[in-house]
Image (cartoon, grey):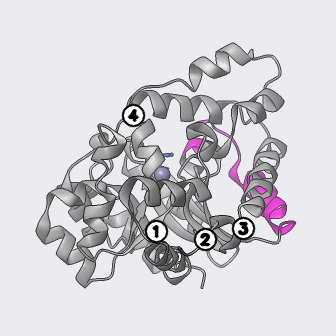
Amino acid sequence: MARMTRWNEVQKAELHLHLEGSVTPETMRELAPDVSAEEIAARYAFTDFAGFLRCFIWVVEHLHTPDDYALITRRLLERLRLENVTYAEITLAAGVVLWKKQEFAPIYDAVKRAAAESAIAVFWNLDATRQFGAEHAMRVAELAADRAGDGVISYGIGGDEERGPAEWFFAVYEFARAHGLRLTAHAGETVGPHSVWGALRLGAERIGHGIRSAEDAQLLRHLRDHNIPLEICISSNVATGAVRSLADHPVRRIYDAGVPIILNTDDPGVFRCTLNGEYELAARQFGFSDTELRGIAENGFRYAFGR
Ligand code: ADE
Ligand code: ZN
């Protein structure tokens, strides 16, 4: 029998990865020495999507200075290096920086500088928080537009899709596109196929998660025919309860329908997952062959915005 691929030997790209969600409990201790290990463990022990979003916000609230952001960038890139990730598009929750009333420019300069020290090719996706509304999303798009070509490659929306329908953001996406930004959006993670259709109407070129597309055969055909990839994050979907169980994850059905997919970790520090682990999980749980997974790893570069 052929030797199984060791995923560490394969160069990979991460296209759906949140900087703030990369903060492990150990790094939290470094950032907030006054917070007990027990409290951190309790905050990280959510059981549903709302609990996850609370945890994410709690982590971000503990990022007080540009140096804090630089530290978590370095920690993340050190781990990606060990996983043989050579290209990363990292999402920075610029919307939450504004919500905290922090100045964005020094934070962006700090993460950009930290990334420049790494051998990994890094581009930034600035994302707005859907439930904060369209005006907020426009402020984030303006920050992204100011830095288009200066490390920021794309614009996206995340957060709670139930409380921020795509229709709110048409003008924002139009603005972002006009300023040279590539477009992505979280959709079809916790809300059904209509949310993915909405993201497509916004002009999203890649869909974050999009797993609920599996419920709509016409949508699957559309994604396939228009070559729109889904950024699949299996462990994330299990941890947030976006799928009922690992066995229920539709990644195999989506792939078999011909939709391009990429494997990603989403929030690896919070979900305690790794990119190599996602490949192993896809093989073990869903029977993906090494050849299929190598093709999926290539998709990480094919659908990258920065290439
Ligand atoms: N922000 C960080 N991770 C997210 C996710 N999985 N869904 C929506 N917003 C997020
Ligand atoms: Zn995400």
| Picture disc at residue 262 | 1
Say whether residue 77 is left or right of residue 206.
right
Name the one closer to the observer, 148 or 184. 184
- Mark 4 = which residue? 49
Q: Secondary structure at mark 4?
A: helix
Secondary element under disc 1, as helix, strand or loop, is strand
| N-terminal-most mark, 4 or 1 | 4
Q: Which residues are magenta?
A: 96-118
Q: Which residue is mark 3?
A: 84
Distance between the Cα atoms at labels 1 and 2?
A: 9 Å
Disc 3 marks a residue whose amino acid type is Asn
CA–CA distance in space, label 4 to label 1: 22 Å
Spatial CA distance of label 3 from label 2 is 9 Å
Q: Which mark is residue 13?
A: 2
Secondary structure under tag 2 reads strand
Mark 3 near mark 2, Cβ–Cβ under 8 Å? no
Q: Nearer the viewer, residue 136 or 263?
A: 263
**Quadrant into which the C terminus falls:** bottom right
Callouts 1 and 2 close, C-beta under 8 Å: yes
Q: Label 3's element?
A: loop
